[in-house]
């Protein structure tokens, strides 16, 4: 349906958003998006998607990416709506700890189902962290203070290892989102260990490497869509 040339068209976007958008359509300096509040930024992104203003799309994506730490769920909802895969996967991991009520209201049902499957993968990875070694571990005698292994297993479990295992478990709190801070978790654990047990030192290194390997194997949210 054609629109008569003298007919006024009412657009739903605010004058501020339209003015910003028009700056990307003419030969003039583009706006500094770092000066925008998040609500204005995401509204501009919506308008750029709606009217396919390609010169604005990428820069909006960049600044929305930078906003993920403060607004992960809103950025994820935006990215899912417009099928922006890289933004989806970047924002998704930051929503692992979000309350389900917020996710249900922010996401479309089929997107929420995909997110639940994604969250399950994070929970499975967290479960494997606790299965790395028994907290009541007996390593080789002589390896507590020496570089090489001893000749027989310790009679009693290593008290140092039990303390370290409990420290990691306590810091993770049973929450998959704490895996995003795994470097800090193991840094604090190594500080607690000090030079008390060489065997435990090697175990901590192996434990962190296994956790990081598991995190790399978690499928991206976009693979569930």
Image (cartoon, grey):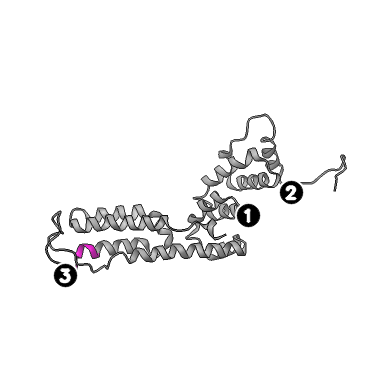
Q: Which mark is residue 50?
A: none
Viewer-side residue, 161 vs 11:
161
Viewer-side residue, 221 vs 18:
221
* Sooner in the amino-acid sequence: mark 3 or mark 2: 2
* Sooner in the amino-acid sequence: mark 3 or mark 1: 1
Left or right of 213, for residue 14: right
Question: Residue 191: x, y in percent?
Answer: 25, 53
Of badges 3 and 2, nearer the viewer stands 3
Q: Which mark is residue 81?
A: 1
Q: Real-space Cα distance between discs 2 and 1?
A: 18 Å
Q: Real-space Cα distance between discs 3 and 1?
A: 57 Å
- Read off the magenta span: 155-162
Numbered disc total: 3
Residue occupied by mark 3? 156
Q: CB atoms at circles 3 and 1 under 8 Å apart?
A: no
Residue occupied by mark 2? 12
């Amino acid at each position: 349906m054609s629109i008569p040339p003298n007919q006024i068209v009412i657009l739903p976007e605010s004058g501020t958003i339209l003015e910003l958008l028009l700056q990307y359509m003419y030969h003039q300096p583009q706006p500094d998006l770092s000066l925008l509040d998040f609500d204005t930024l995401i509204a501009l992104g919506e308008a750029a998607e709606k009217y396919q203003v390609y010169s604005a799309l990428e820069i909006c994506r960049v600044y929305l990416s930078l906003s993920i730490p403060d607004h992960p769920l809103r950025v994820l909802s935006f990215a899912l709506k417009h099928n922006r895969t890289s933004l989806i996967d970047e924002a998704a991991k930051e929503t692992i700890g979000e309350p389900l009520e917020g996710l249900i209201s922010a996401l479309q049902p089929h997107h929420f189902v995909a997110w639940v499957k994604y969250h399950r993968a994070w929970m499975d990875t967290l479960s494997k962290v606790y299965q790395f070694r028994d907290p009541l571990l007996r390593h080789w005698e002589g390896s507590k203070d020496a570089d090489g292994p001893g000749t027989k297993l310790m009679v009693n479990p290593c008290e140092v290892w039990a303390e370290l295992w409990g420290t990691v478990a306590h810091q993770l709190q049973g929450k998959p989102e704490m895996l995003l801070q795994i470097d800090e978790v193991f840094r604090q654990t190594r500080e607690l260990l000090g030079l008390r047990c060489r065997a435990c030192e090697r175990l901590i290194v192996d434990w962190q490497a296994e956790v990081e390997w598991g995190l790399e194997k978690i499928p991206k949210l976009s693979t569930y869509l």
